[in-house]
Image (tube, rainbow, N blue to C red):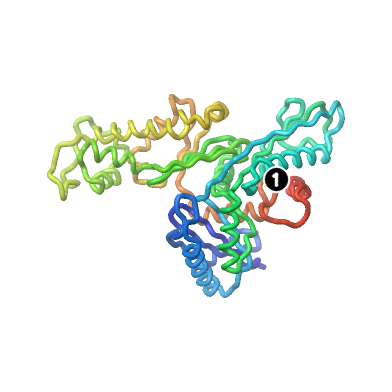
Amino acid sequence: MSSLPKLYINISDLEISLLAGHNDDQNSFKLLEKIIFPIEGISKNKIIDLEKIINIIKRNILITEQKINYTFKDIIIILNNFEISFVNLCGFKKLNGTQISKENITYLLNLLKSCVDEFEENKKILHIFNSEYCLDKKKLDNLPIGLFGNFYSHELSFNLINKNDYKNLENIFKRCNLKIKKILLESFVKGSLVNDTNPKIETFFYIQIGENDSKIFYVENNSIKFEQKFNFGTEIIVDDICKITSLKVNTVKNIISENKNIHKVLDKELIEEKYFNDQQYRKIKKNLIAKIAEARIVELSEKFYLKNINLKKLLEKVDEIFLEINDQQHFSCFNNVYEKSFTSNNKYKIRTLKKPSIEQIINKADNIVQFGWKKEAIPITKVSGSYISRIFRAIFS
């Protein structure tokens, strides 16, 4: 028998996706209704017009409920456009040859959580990950309950959202007669998708390049530990080509969309006359466009991670980089240039990805909501029971 319908909302930079569905007998999420609409009232990772965003979300929730003949009481949110901060803390416990117990770990978890509450009083915890366990300096895959040792260390990674942003989200959905059941970071969901298809890869960078913005996040031991956003994307490559060649933006985009692997063209090959419909034809070599793009793509690789001061210590831990370029025509034109530039003299292995569909994102999010994540230590917004007891229910379930 299928479960009751559930409501998901994915809030990205340009649009909001509202999806309703239910789980079938095999616990697979089956989509019943999907509405995608432009984002209004949110700009530059902040809510700037509360009434506008409330009205547009409320209107589309009502449409969804009418279509499937069901009234929702709660909602699960996937966030991609709010400022998120990350704190990684490690606690230690001297054992002196004794057996490690749940009480030892309770002490460390309570200590680390208290530190975050004290020093990040204006932020709310969204995710907590068990990112590393060490017993006598030896890294372990699982909690070492019952093992003997002298020194135990436990690292937790905290993902935080500003409390005011969280209160605004609560208010938005309260006005829609909905309670927030859970909030997931889209980066966390995408990192989980990567691990599904690459189960042996637990530490990596994920670089997402859009047309006007980009993002890099870092996953270590299947725990998301860092994220940074950039206010530029593939459009700066188009702008460079336009400036140097004096071609119009639409002309450059047409050339890019209809030329694959442009760096492989012959040195003397010229841009065809058909692209100059509204401009006087000029002899411009295709490899000039390739060279302009390559110069900028090399710079992008440096800005994203190679010369990114925020990632200096993390670069030593990573061999794999997953690269998602949202514009597939752009990537088809310059794919070898990206792979060459981002591998940094074969130091890193680049794995290119297609942008996950909203259905893939929601299916994975639903799986996490149902069954949890192997490294996540706590449900996100539940308030019943003590904080530490909820952590243990998540860890030992």
| Rendered residue at 61%/64% (across/down) | 6
**In the visual, does 245 lie left or right of 33?**
left
**In the visual, does 33 lie left or right of 375?**
left
In the displayed structure, would residue 21 be above or below residue 162?
Answer: below
| Rendered residue at 49%/65% (across/down) | 51
Q: Position of residue 38 (x, y in %)?
A: 42, 60
Q: Position of residue 62 (x, y in %)?
A: 53, 72
Going by the numbered disc 1, the residue's amino acid type is Ala
277, 52: nearer the viewer: 52
Q: Quadrant of residue 155?
A: top right
What number of labels is visible? 1
In the displayed structure, would residue 93 be above or below residue 126?
Answer: above
| Rendered residue at 28%/42% (across/down) | 259
| Residue named by callout 1 | 377
Q: Residue furthest right?
A: 98
| Rendered residue at 57%/57% (across/down) | 77
200, 66: nearer the viewer: 66
22, 184: nearer the viewer: 184
Check disc 1: other Cα within 10 Å, few if <14, some if 14-19, many if 20+. Answer: many
In the structure shown, which secondary structural element does the residue marked by tag 1 occupy?
Answer: loop
**In what quadrant of the picture does the N terminus appear?**
bottom right
Q: Quadrant of residue 167?
A: bottom right
Q: Position of residue 57 (x, y in %)?
A: 50, 65
